[in-house]
Amino acid sequence: MSVYRLSHQAEEDLNEIADYIADSSPQAADDVIEALFQTLQTLAANCGIGQCRDDLRPGLHVFPARHPAQNYVICYFLIEGGIEVATIVHGRRDWLGLFERGVR
């Protein structure tokens, strides 16, 4: 069975995403968080899908979440038996810059 493990940063990201969206629509927040978790399960079961971004961090992979969370990018590393999620960021953020500056 494949698993995903959330870093502390990824847990914070999920909480911030849920809180931000829930301010406008609690149902939309639930839908987005559910889509993110479904994407995490898909990534864990299909290790290696997504784009490898060794230029940002050795072994880093990125993958867009499924609808309705398609605006979010999941950044993760392969681990034995699954993945470890480093961070989840909105695609409109300068997520490349976050890695280049060492913020993530």
Image (cartoon, rainbow, N blue to C red):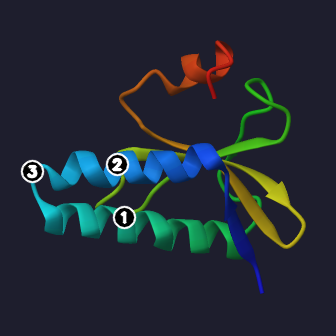
Q: Is residue 65 visible?
A: yes
Q: Who's the residue at 51% across and 27% down the image?
A: 95
Residue type pointed to by label 1 = Ile
Which residue is disc 2 drawn over? Answer: 17
Residue type pointed to by label 3 = Ser
Q: Is residue 79 left or right of residue 35?
A: right
Marks 3 and 1 in Cβ contact (< 8 Å): no
Q: Is residue 92 left or right of residue 64?
A: left
Specify the quadrant that holds the C terminus.
top right
Disc 1, SS:
helix
Q: Is residue 83 left or right of residue 26?
A: right
Which residue is disc 1 drawn over? Answer: 33
Which residue is disc 3 drawn over? Answer: 24
Give residue 64's position: percent from left, percent from top. Answer: 49, 50
- Cα–Cα gap, marks 3 and 1: 14 Å
Specify the quadrant that holds the N terminus.
bottom right
Q: Who's the residue at 57% across and 66% down the image?
A: 40
Q: Nearer the viewer, residue 66 or 89?
A: 89
Q: Nearer the viewer, residue 52 or 73?
A: 73
**Residue density around tag 3, few if under 14, some if 14–19, many if 20 or more, within 10 Å:** few
Give residue 46's position: percent from left, percent from top. Answer: 71, 71
